[in-house]
Amino acid sequence: MISCDFIKGALRWEQEPDNPTIVVEGINSTNVTLSWTYSLDPGATLQGVVFERTSRENFLKRTSLLSRLPNQEFRYLKDEFVKEYRANLPSRLVLLDVNNDEEYMYSVVVQYNDMSMVLYHVSAPMTAIIVQGKYQKQLNIFFS
């Protein structure tokens, strides 16, 4: 297995979420959507998609949230994630309720084979979530 971050190869990132993604608690803090769009070169075959999160304090510890195989729906990797996340095809993660103690950054890993049949795991750059209180946001608008 070859695992690499930001490698282009047969995969191209066409769209990534804003980084950081700004959330205002109580205004747009439910159903926060992080969407990644990618394309694979001809001859490359999708093998899987995995959403991951990592703590801001420990970048090396990644937790897989949901995954899917080709032509299948996403499945939760822990029951506790059902209350926190939703995933939509092809690679959209929805955070159901973000609050001011949000401590994670998010990414998607795309797994594919090329014509050499080597399995590649390519991670998108991590996306941070910054949460502001609704009054803080109003003050920022007023004074800017």
Image: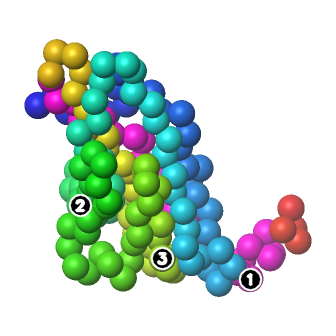
Q: Estimate how packed mark 2 is, as few (under 14), some (14 to 19) or many (20 or more) residues with alpha carbons within 10 Å.
A: some
SS under mark 3: strand
Q: Is 131 in front, or is 50?
A: 50
Q: Is residue 22 left or right of residue 55?
A: right
Q: Give the range drawn in magenta.
A: 118-140
Sequence order check: which comes first, mark 1 or mark 3? 3
Q: At 55% across and 49% down in the image, what residue appears?
A: 17
Q: Mark 2 points at which residue?
A: 63
Numbered badge on residue 96: 3
Look at the image and tell me whether residue 64 can be seen: yes
Please tell me which residue is depicted at 58% across the width and 58% down the height of the picture: 21
Single out the mark in the foreground, 1 or 3: 3
Quarter occupied by the N terminus: top left
Q: Where is residue 27 in the image (x, y as percent from the top left)?
A: 69, 79
Q: Is residue 65 above or below residue 102?
A: above
Q: What residue is rendered at 50% in x and 41% in y? A: 37
